[in-house]
Image (cartoon, helix red, strand yellow):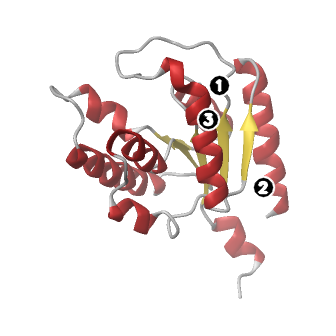
Amino acid sequence: MKNSEDFANELIRIAIVGPESTGKSTISRQLALHYDTVWVPEYARAYCEKLVAECTWEDEINMFRGQLELEEQISSLANRLLICDTTFITVKIWSDHMFGRAPQEVLDKLPVHNYDLYLLMDIDLPWQEDPLRDFPHMREHFMEVWHKELIALNATYRLISGSEEERFRNAVSYIDGFLLSK
């Protein structure tokens, strides 16, 4: 049985997720600074910046493995909270969209690699052009997909909307409330 000291030392994983161009990286940095902890950047961004051809099935698997490895490396530096700028669920979503299915390795890991709280970034911010972003016309579609994926995982999640400042305040409020309930 865990005592109160165990809970105080337990790493709490906060996943910042959502469609493209919704401010995930910005709020991840802000939250890590606010909570005096570290954040795990999106592995796929750095990976895709190096690609010289279209993303392949093997690339998706590499991004899945890379995200998990990066998260594991950075978790040892966390101060109770680990802020994750996206998760490998993105690999499932992109693979389903691009290839019609997701790698079995990803599907097997989803139910056992949990995050304590997901903050789902809303699509109410203006689209920001970026060479690594592909689907400005499909934001509503991917927002629905994110809701479905989080519900399928029975995940604890909150929708974060509004301006950058409102998003930060709402995220802090949800995280603080979650921490008080632990």
Q: Residue flagged by tag 1: what amino acid is it?
A: Ile
Q: Is mark 2 on a helix, strand or loop?
A: helix
Q: Can residue 116 be seen in this view?
A: no
Q: Which of marks 2 and 1 is in front?
A: 1
Q: Can residue 97 be seen in this view?
A: yes
Residue 128 lies, in percent from the top left, at 51, 12
| Earlier-in-chain disc, 3 versus 1 | 1
Residue 178 lies, in percent from the top left, at 79, 54
The residue beneath circle 2 is: 179
Question: Disc 3 vs disc 2: Cβ atoms closer than 8 Å?
Answer: no
Identify the residue at the far bottom of this view.
1
The residue positioned 71% from the left and 66% from the top of the image is 8
Q: Which numbered circle lies on residue 143?
A: 3
Q: Residue flagged by tag 3: what amino acid is it?
A: Met
The residue beneath circle 1 is: 123
Identify the residue at the far left of this view.
52
Using the rendered view, name the quadrant where residue 31 is placed: top right
The residue positioned 63% from the left and 52% from the top of the image is 150
